[in-house]
Image: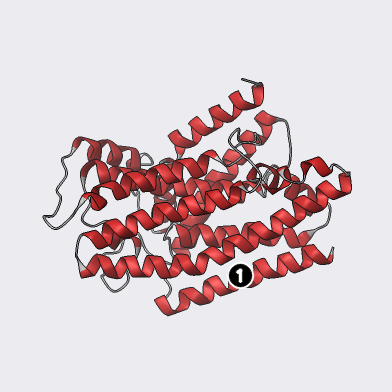
Amino acid sequence: MNQGTVFYLIQLFLALILAPLLPGIINRVKARFAGRQGKPLLQTYYDLARLLRKGEVIGRTATWTFSAGPGVALAATLCALALLPLGGAPSPLGFGGDFLLAAYLLGMGRFALILAALDTGSSFEGMGASREAAFSALAEPVLFLVFLMLTSLSLDLVRHTGQSAELVAALSLSAMFGGQATEAWLAGRAELLLAPAVFFVLLLVENCRIPVDDPNTHLELTMIHEVMVLDHSGPNLAMIVYGAALKLWFFAALTAGLLTPPLPLWQQAGLCLLIILALAAAVGVVESVMARLRLTRIPHLLGGAAALASLALILTQVR
């Protein structure tokens, strides 16, 4: 096992341990804006420990699909996270085109939770599942537009170096988020700064944060993700909460990978970690200064993100 693999495993371990810290940072920032003390910073850890000790209540109409959904969603998110370069270290599991696998692993996790919600037979949870499916269908093209722009940039960089053998490797997440994009926009390609902005919008959408969804609401006309997990309890709910924290870390790490320049491993890892924590604080600021959008406005938000991603792609091709 080489030094890069060991360093990556350390970064992955830190991600698994620190992911529940991100919701705590968001809640503390929101509390400060509201003039309250708020929940403890480690509240998500306390919630996970409490849920793991509790029993589980399962409805009589539910089948094995209901119980399997949270586990499948958590496993899919873990596998997607393992494909990301962390702290400047490339993933040992990475390969050309792994961004497709990562995207559809997240999609499989969402699909498992949707099936679990529908399996309860509740029209209330079915409503949330239909909204989750609709908005994810709008967010997925935006994600692939940004990936297309980054793969185009990686292929251009490889062609300029004349290393044709590296063309396949350029299509991996480790190549796209290893610092090359940061080097490019620092060198004057300002259109690449649109990519972190789009990823931040996707972070809000995919993690059901304001302005898309309010994780603290209990109004049936506005709930999306939270309504899907109302019937889950005990360890299954703990897996959902932890999987949501890992998914938040995943999108924050994608955004941080586009803002972190290539540095020595320990320096790049420290800077990437600081950016991830700062992004969590930025989510708290967004949720403190604006209200949730009406459901009919969310496609407009995703349409604007798609326009920015398309503009970045076009400008990258023009260069």
Q: Which residue is mark 1?
A: 306
Tell me where residue 95 appears, x and y as whole percent: 64, 41
Q: Relative to 245, does residue 2 appear above or below in the rendering?
A: above
Tell me where residue 74 appears, x and y as whole percent: 38, 44
Tell me where residue 132 appears, x and y as whole percent: 38, 65
**Looking at the rendering, in which quadrant would you find the C terminus?**
bottom right
Crowding around mark 1 (Cα neighbors within 10 Å: few <14, some 14 to 19, many 20+) is: many
In the visual, does 153 lie left or right of 266? right
Q: Residue at x 45, y 35 (%)?
A: 16
Judge whether residue 4 can be spotted in this image: yes
Numbered-mark total: 1
**What coloring was used for the rendering?**
secondary structure
Nearer-the-camera pick, 54 or 217? 54
Q: Relative to 102, does residue 305 appear above or below in the rendering?
A: below
Judge whether residue 39 can be spotted in this image: no
Q: Residue at x 15, y 50 (%)?
A: 58
Q: Residue at x 19, y 53 (%)?
A: 63
Q: Residue at x 37, y 43 (%)?
A: 242
Nearer-the-camera pick, 27 or 54? 54
In the visual, does 85 lie left or right of 208? right
Q: Relative to 13, does residue 312 appear above or below in the rendering?
A: below
